[in-house]
Structures are given as structure tokens and as C-alpha cells.
Image (tube, coloured by chain):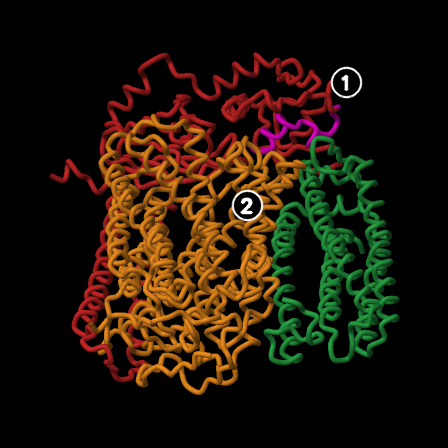
Chain colours: A orange, B red, C green
Amino acid sequence: MPTQPITSETMPKEHYLNADYGIRSWLLTIDHKRIALLYLLSVTVAFALGGAYAVLVRLELLTPAGDFFTAENYNKMFTAHGVIMVFFFMIPAIPATLGNFLLPMMIGAKDLAFPRINLLSWYLYVVGFLVTLGALFVGGLDTGWTFYTPYSTAFANSNVVAAGVGIFISGFSSILTGFNFIVTIHKMRAPGMTWFRMPLFVWAHYATSLIQILGTPVVAVTILMVAAERLFKFGFFDPTRGGDPILFQHLFWFYSHPAVYIMILPAMGVISELVTCFSRKRVFGYDFIAMSSLAIAVLSFLVWAHHMFVSGMSVYAAMIFSALSFLVAIPSAIKVFNWTATLFRGSVSWQTPMLYAMGFIGLFLIGGLTGLFLASVGLDIHVTDTYFIVAHFHYVMVGGTIMAYLGGLHFWWPKMTGRLYPEWWARVSAVLVFVGFNTTFLPQFILGYLGMPRRYYAYPEEFQVLNVMSTAGASILGVGFLLPIFYLAWSMRYGRISSANPWPATGLEWQTPSPPPTENFPRTPVVDEEAYDYTRPPKEIALV
Amino acid sequence: MWQGFPLFPEQASSLAARVDEFYIFMWLVTAFFTVTISATMLYFAVRYRRRRADERPGEIHGSLALELTWTIIPLLIVVVMFVWATLLFFAQRRTPDDAMQVTVVGKRWMWKLQHMTGQREINELHVPVGKAVRLMLTSEDTIHSFYVPAFRMKMDAVPGRYNETWFRATKPGKYHIFCAEYCGTEHSGMIGWVYAMEPTDYQLWLAGGPAPVSLAEMGQKLFAERNCATCHTPQGAGRGPVLNGLPGSKVLLQGGEEWVADDTYLRESILRPSAKIVSGYQPVMPTFQGQLGEEDLAALIAYIKSLPAAAGDAAGRPSSNVPASK
Amino acid sequence: MSDAHAGPLRHHFATLQQQKESATLGMWVFIAQEIMFFGGLFGTYAIYRYLYYAAFEDASHHLDWKLGAINTGVLICSSLTMALAVHAAAVGKGKQIAAWIAATILLGSIFLGVKVVEYKEKFDHHLVPGPKFHYVPHAEAARAADPEIDRHSQIYFSLYFMMTGLHALHMIIGIPLLAWMGWRGWRGEFSALYHSPIEITGLYWHFVDIVWIFLFPLLYLIGHH
């Protein structure tokens, strides 16, 4: 069969997983690969929790009346879904798991620049997550993940400050990860690994890290201001005390818009890697894809007020943000064209990672293009704060990022664990995810245009049919997401043993055993060729 | 069949059709690119399917010509989108001069609407078809958002300021009002109806029910209830300045500054009387902060504006405001 | 996992030079992040000062600019002693490092002490935002210039406490870091070859100083001629 991965008889004798045993060796590790697995476990827990809340939300929305939960509980549930998914899954998922694991290896380094800070990042994530969960479970939070003022500062009777503290702490996890990546990419590349020989996955993470360090602090200080207003009655956002509630929106979205690019850029980096390997051809337009990542990072800071078109802003301000929001779509379009062109005259394999990559391209097209609907002020006025928005961002975040995450997880699973996942089950899951996802969210575009607002737990009867369709899709999607948890766990013990380079793919991470030794490479690699050279057979690996 | 499965809300305003046209255009562009690119991708994936495990296709680095093409063409397309959408936006923001005004106050969890002719409505808005309606939106507490899908119209109601939007209903009927900015527990209950009526029906509605009290008449009632006349007499013999003819004129404040007595000044003087004391008067007026809502204030201001100017009132207002006791 | 094995070179770095450069770049990246962190507050300050200038000017006069100036001088001196500590580390004079660090910590503590005095004074004069806030304008004409001065001055003081408070917090975090560096210096861990930790701590301290140099005129000197 032309697309079977290359297996091996035995695992390497010594690798990073068996280098040391015991809980302390994991909780005190400074090995970026172990830290990546710690993150993998944590974000999976977060995803499961966030997903559970989504299920509850969709259950309530089966009927027009608010008959399943009370209004307060529903509001707490959609808030919990948003807070957990945004801050504790979407932001860290790819960078902290795949990025942590692969970045040093892809550039031929032994570890990140600051391994202990990397571990600190994980602890900050966990502490932040626990604090936030405490706030969500004990009493709850009902402000929505966007916690707009003055509702959050002067009216909400829920754990705003506690949740804010948790998110604040986890923000520093994100900042330190970005900081670590930037220094690593600048300073730790192996001899011969010039900037333009780096894998596009690395470029994507570099751009992401820029956003992480420059954007996250702004939301951090905004959270502090909200806390100060609640606790000490400072009046930054309170009109009865001279403050301006819209100022909050500016400060909040100044981070939160770039944040969505923190979520999508790493995903795009993954897709570049998948498309090239499974077309067995170098990525078309490498320079353009690399530069477009940087362009997205810069432009992402200039468009935030497109979330505020109906807040009462001046016509001129709206025009400027609208124009810039259209502009930020162009670099993403460039990537999509280049990925498609990569398949031309390639040798295309339909294995699971490629299924996810192809799914990404289709769904990201819809998600990204519906973003243009929202950049159009005249149309945004009608659809903002409706289910159209909900559909749009789920298309890019789930149809985009999560599909890339799953594709990447499957692609590098043999590298991380030394085992192959079961291909048949993986393909079934991919199809379930694709079908379930579209069934869930395509109806929501229609619902939004018909006028159903967001964050409604009861709605007019005429919206029921589409809501039922959406909930039905969610149940399929849920199964598609659950299956990998089971078969990936299963594969760690019973999966076929993978060779060092099962696909095979180019890239330094594949030139070392699967799983890799703790120091990644027996000898520091020296790079003398461009990335993605598929004209030659993969290098022989000396298994020490 | 479409009745059973609508994709659009009714088109009930002058701009709704334009919004829908643009929307359809956007979906056509989206469908075009999604389908063609996905089809191309799938075609390549099938046509160039791996047939042998050791296949090694040739190298293609890229093509500057293609990069330029697929950068410039999307750029041109988004320029078209931007121009079209912005022209639509201008129309949405340019309130016609002949618009009738309705003040809308959002409050958890209801909409309070006030016509200039005095009608007050809760969660309902009766308007005549064919007439432009200007909505002045504000909130008493959190941010709300007044959304009428059938008009393709939405604008936030923000505490501490007024936001303006407008519409012209084109079809009689009953249309949803939704609150579209999350505001707490009963956010989904903060809904209502716009009743667009034929002009004749609208006149009937205006005339029907108890004789509507004009804003100024409401103000007169409040003025009496709150004993404002105790200090503010038309002859100037009380402890407070004369209010007849005051709106729009200049007052001399303590400290020598002159100030124009506009609506904001009047409103402020009721809520924070010590802010701008008229020269020659003592700061003895009590504050009505917390006792009067926005509608009450609007009514009082309307009443003060309706007072006939004092006889012999020439250009120099301050002279007629010399207090009785000096 | 141990970092004492081959002297200061950590296992994942190829050379000491690479390690040093990484540490320095890291600190600059961190400072960029800190600039954005304070940036949110400076942005808020700029907006409200533009909107409520008269109130801000009057409220600024409630601050004792002399104390502020003293604190500015103290902090600048502490940057000097910090730089001298780093220099001592570069030439490997362990005891001197500890001495200069001690001086830096002393000056930093004086700064914080003065801040405590200032904060207490605000508390006594009911200038802490909240239910007990009660504003008495500094200048007679202030209330005429801005009838809403009670509300707007409260915004000013909210910003005052938030910005100086965050700044003070950075100093409170910095002082133990300095003490740690001083201790390491005393133990002879720094030399011409290896003194990155104290260098980047110095960078951090200078950054905290620079933030104050912006805060002082923006908060204390509005309208002063």
C-alpha cells in the first residue's frame, strides 16, 4: 500500500519518556518534550470541560422556552464555555503542546532558551486554570467571556474578580511561552539553520509569540482595572463616576482581537507542515507564507474596533477599522492559495493528518470569508451580536484551529510517543468531526441573519428548527472529538511501533528517533539545505 | 417552500433590501471561492494521488506571477466590498432631516420608549410606515443594544451617552425587537415589538386611548408635585432664578462666567444645583439626583421651554434675575 | 537538571556567549511586554486627561511635588548604584557587588517609604476613590472650570493609585531579586565571563526607574510652570 507509515520492530532503548520515572520527574521536569505532554494533558482536560458546557448550552437551545436551566445558570454556562475554551484551550493548545515539543527540534536545538521558565509557564497555566475553575464552579461567572462594563464592574453578582485573577495568572503563562519562543528562535538555531531555512511551523510560532508578548499585557492590566473598580470602586468604566464603559471595550479588544490570531497562526503553521509532507512536495511560495505570518501579526493589532461598530463610534473611525479589517484577510488568502498549489503535481496521500488539513482549508475559507461580512460595516450592523458571529468564529476556531490541532497531533503522534495511531478509527473520527461540525454551525449563519441574538437562552419559536439541527450536529461533533481521546490513549500501549520517520517527512525533528532522546539529537545537526527538500530520500538516522 | 424555511427576515425598512443584496453578493463570493478552491484542492488530491510508496515528484518553489495575481485580485475584490458596504453604511448613518424622534431608554430588562408627542411605550414601538424615525438611545444601567432584524438595524444603548440611529418602515406589520448586548439574567427576555402602521392607523393609535399628555404637560405636573414653584416664581421674587425665557439665554454665574442655558445646563442644574450657581443667588436648591428619571428630566425641560418669556424681557437676561432679597 | 555541574553554562546552550545573548534578548523582550502592560494605563490616562484636563490639573496640585521630586532623585541614584553593581560584577569584585546592591535596595526602600507617607496622606484627606472620597478643589476657580470635578478628580486619583501602585509592586518584586543577586555576588558567582543574571536584573531595575520618570511629571506636574 503506498500510504502505509513505516513501522519498526522495537522502540529506541532510551528516550525522553523512559529517561526517568516517577511523578517528580514529570512535575519537576525541564525537558520541553515532557512539558509539552503536561500541557497536552491539561488542555485536553480543559477541552473536555469546555465541551461539556457546550453540550449543556445546546441542550437548552433545543426548545424555544428556557425550560431546562434557569436563566442565571444558562448565563453561567455559556460564560464558562467561552472562558475555558478561549483562555485555557484555544490560546495554549497548539503553541504549548506542539510548539513546545517541536520548536527546539525543528531548529536543531536541545531545548528552549529558558527551560525552567517553560516549566513555570505550565504551572502558571495550571494555577490560573484552577483559580478560574474555582470561580466558575463555586458561584459561577455570568458576564460572558468578554465581561463588558458596566455590567461586569457594577452589576454582576458573580465571581468576576476571582475569575479575572485566574485568567490574569494564565495570561502570564502565555506571555512567558511567547517570550521563550522568540529568544529560542533568535538564538538557538543549529549551524546552517538560517531564517529562511526554518520550517514554516517555526515562522508561524514566531509571529504568534510577537502577538503574545505585546497583546496579552494589555488585557492583563485591563483585568486589573476591572478588579480595582469592583473592589475599590475606582471609576474607570463607570459613567456615574466620570468613566467610560466603551474604554473597556477598546482596551479589551486591543488584546482580544490579536488573540484570535494567536489561535490561528500556529494552526496555519501546522497546515503548512501537513500539506508539504502529504503532497511530498515543498510548500509552494515559502517566502510568501513566511512573510504573511508576520504581516498578519502586525495587522492584527490595527483592527480591534471592528468588534465595536454598533457602540456609537464615528463614521470615520468605522471606515478606517473596516478597511484595515479587509486588509488583514489578504495574507490569509495568500496562504490558502499557496497550500492548494502545493498539491499540484505532488504525491498526495489521504492519511488522517491530510484529511484534517484539507478539511481545514475548506472550513477556514468559509470562516475567513464570513469575516469579510463582518468587516463590512453596513452588514455588520445587522449581524453583530447574533448567531452569525457565533458561526463565523466557530468556523475559524473549530473548523480552523481545532482541525489543524488534531491533524498535527496525529502527524506528530509517532514522534511524541513512538506509536502509530489506528488509521481507520482516525479517519472515521475526522469524517465525524467534519460532518458534525458543519451540521452544528452552518445553520447558525442562517439563524444569525434571521435575527437570533447571542447569549439567549429562550428564543422565538420560529428559530427552533435551525436550533434543533445545530444541536443534532453537536452530538455528532462530540463523538468525533471523544474518539481520539480513546484511541490515542489506547495507541500509547497497543499501537504499532513507529519508525523514526514513518511518513516519511523532511525536517530535523524526523532525523532523530521516535520517541526522541532527552537531548533531542545525539550530535548537533548541521543544516545545509532548504526546508522541505523532498527530491531526495530521507536521511539515514543513526540510532545510537 | 421558502415560507416554511426562511433565510431572511422580512424586509420592512427602506434599507433592508440593500443590506440583503450585499449579503447575497458576499455569499456568492464566499461560495465561489470556497467551492473553486476546495474543488481544485480535491481534484489535485485525487489526480496526484500517491500511487507508489517511493514516488518523488519534482520541485516547484513558487511563482511570483501567481503570488501577485492572487494577492492583487483579492485586494481588488475587497476594495469593491469595502466601497459597497461603506456606501450602505453612510445611508444607515445619515438620518433624514424630517425624521420624527423617539427616545429609547434601555433598563434591565425592558425598553422604555418615549415619543415627542408624549406617548410612552414599554417594549413596544408604534410608528407610521413611510416616515423616518430617529431613535436616541441610552441606558439607565448596563449597555444594551436595540435590534430590529426586519429593519436590519442595531445600535447600542450605552449609559452616560446618547447614540443615534434611524429607520424608515416600509411595510405595515409586527417586527421583533431584541436586546442584542448581554445585560444579565433576563437578557433574552428584553424583547418587544415594533408596530409599523399605515399612516391613518397610526393617527388613530395616537388619538386612541386616554388623551396623551405632552411632554410639557407631564413636566408641568412634576413641577407642581416637586414644589419647584416655591422658589422659582415667574416674577423673580423667590429664592431661585426666573425660569421663564431662560432656555437658550445667557446666564451670569457666580465667579463672573457667562453660560448658555442649554438642555444640558438645565438637566445639570436639576441634578447638581451647586454646579453652576447663578450670580447673586444662594446655593440652597436641593438636588433631585436619584429622584427623577430621564423621562422626568426631559419632561421638566420641555415644560420650562414652554413657559412664556417674562414681559419686557430684552436682551439682557441677568438684570431680570436680580434676587428679591439682596 | 542541576545547574551547578559545569559552572554557569547550562546544558542546552552550546556556548556561554549564546547563553548570555539569550538572557539579554529575553530581558528586552520582557521589557517590551512590560511597556505594553503599563501602556494600557498610560493610554487610559491620556484619554481622561484630554477629556478632563481642568480636573486633572487641579487634582495634581494635591500631590506634593517636592516629595515626588525627592523620590525621583532617589530612584535615579538607585539606578546609578545598580549600574555600579553590574560594573563590579563585570570585574569580578564580589564584595563591591553586594555593597552597591545594598545601596540600591536601601534607596528603593526609601522610595517605597516615601510612597507610604504619600498614600497615608491621601487616605487622611479622603482622596482615595471609593465611598469615602471627598474632593476639595485646590484652586477656587476649579469647580467653575469643571462642575463635574468631584467625579473627574476621582478618575484622576484612580489612575494615580493604579499607576503608582503597579509601579511600586514592580519595585517590591525587584527588591528580593536584587537581594538574591547581591547574595550571589557576595558568594563570588559573577565574573567578567559570567554576569548575565545581575545584568538583566539591572535592566529590569532601570526599566522600573524609567517608568517612574514618566509617572512623575504626568501625575505630579500637571499645570506646573
Query: Which residue in the structure is indicated by mark 2?
Result: A248
Residue B127 at what x, y percent from top left?
A: 31, 29
Query: Which residue in the structure is indicated by mark 1?
Result: B325
- Which range of residues does the magenta coloring cover? B262-282
Q: Is residue B155 left or right of residue A137?
A: left
Q: Residues within 10 Å of mark 2 (few under 14, many from 20)?
A: many
The quadrant where residue A120 appears: bottom right
* Disc assigned to residue A226: none
Residue A351 visible in rendering = yes
Q: Residues within 10 Å of mark 1 (few under 14, many from 20)?
A: few
Residue B325 at what x, y percent from top left?
A: 77, 18
Q: Is residue C11 left or right of residue B32?
A: right
The residue closer to the viewer here, A428 or A70, is: A428
Give the CA distance from mark 2 to mark 1. 50 Å
Mark 2 vs 1: CB contact within 8 A: no
The residue closer to the viewer here, A226 or B133, is: A226
Q: Amino acid at mark 2?
A: Phe
Number of marks in the rendered image: 2
The quadrant where residue A470 appears: top left
Which of discs 2 and 1 lies nearer the camera? The answer is: 2
Q: Is residue A280 magenta?
A: no
Q: Do the residues indicated by labels 2 and 1 lie within the same chain of the protein?
A: no
Seen from this angle, which residue lies furthest left?
A: B1
At a point 26% along the width and 32% down the height, the residue shown is B129
Q: Secondary structure at mark 1?
A: loop
Q: Secondary structure at mark 2?
A: helix
